Amino acid sequence: MFWQVLKVVAASYFLGAMPFGYIVGKLKGLDITRVGSGNIGATNAFRVLGPAAGLTVLLLDAGKGFLAAYLGMHVAGTELMAVAAGGIAVVAHSYSVFLGFKGGRGVACAAGVLLYLMPVVIAAELAVFIFTVAVTRYVSVGSITAAAFLPLIIGLINPRVSFIGFGVLTGGFVIYKHIPNIRRLLAGTEPKLGRRADGY
């Protein structure tokens, strides 16, 4: 069992650490860490690389979380390890060894974990995200709001201790990673949906 757990932990970290936004940007001749917000996630990819590249990054980042949770369940063989593996992938996305322990906010990766473990929860989270973005026109506000509601939604839909723990820790982590966005929101410099991030 020890070796299975070790394999899952290592695989989950390296999966999560894969900087797909950076890779896709390089394929298009651009260093995404030096343009727009400098973030490797899907939002910045949409803004500076275009919709097709942004969607590609979104799917690949979500896939990392989904696969990590899958490995935790099917290699280590427990729900708790699936949750842990997913959490490791989210942290690894934000602190990638391939980018000097920098990375993204972890939203898409966390969504992939939820898609595997709690598909009904991700549907509810998506509704919160879409509604918030539609009202505010800020993707970051949608992400922060969805993260804040995550433990509550899990508690209402799938109140297992390990799942609620994932919601609390991951939701808090995503909000923490959005501190730069919160500062820009307070300063009035956060770009709204549809605005290119050139120069910010």
Image (cartoon, rainbow, N blue to C red):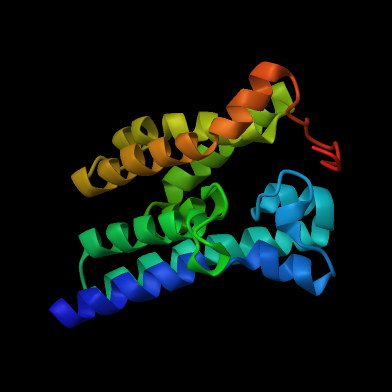
Q: Quadrant of residue 79?
A: bottom left
The answer to whether residue 3 is left or right of residue 27 is left
Q: Which residue lies at the image location 67% right of the left edge and 22% below the top edge?
A: 185
- Residue 90 picture quarter: bottom left
Give the left or right position of residue 149, taking residue 52 as reference.
Answer: left
Up the image or down, 19 lies above or below 76; here it is above
Q: Of residues 123 and 35, which is closer to you in this image?
A: 35
Along the viewing direction, whichever of 190 and 157 lies nearer the viewer: 190
Q: Position of residue 87 (x, y in %)?
A: 36, 55
Q: Is residue 19 above or below residue 151?
A: below
- The quadrant holding residue 195 is top right
Point out the residue furthest to the left here: 1
Please tell me whether residue 108 is drawn above or below residue 186 in the rendered image.
below
Residue 66 in the image, given as x and y percentages of width and height: 46, 64
Coordinates of residue 196 in the picture (x, y in percent): 86, 41
User: Taking the image as drawn, is residue 106 in sight?
Assistant: yes
Q: How many marks?
A: 0
Q: Is residue 153 left or right of residue 174?
A: left
Residue 198 lies, in percent from the top left, at 86, 43
**Residue at the far bottom in the pictured view:** 3
Residue at the spot x=39%, y=52% of the render? 118
Quarter of the image for the N terminus: give it: bottom left
Q: Is residue 1 visible?
A: no
**In the shown orientation, is residue 149 left or right of residue 144?**
left
> Of residues 187 and 148, which is closer to you in this image?
187
- Position of the C terminus, as image quadrant, is top right
| Residue found 26% across the figure and 43% down from its top | 165
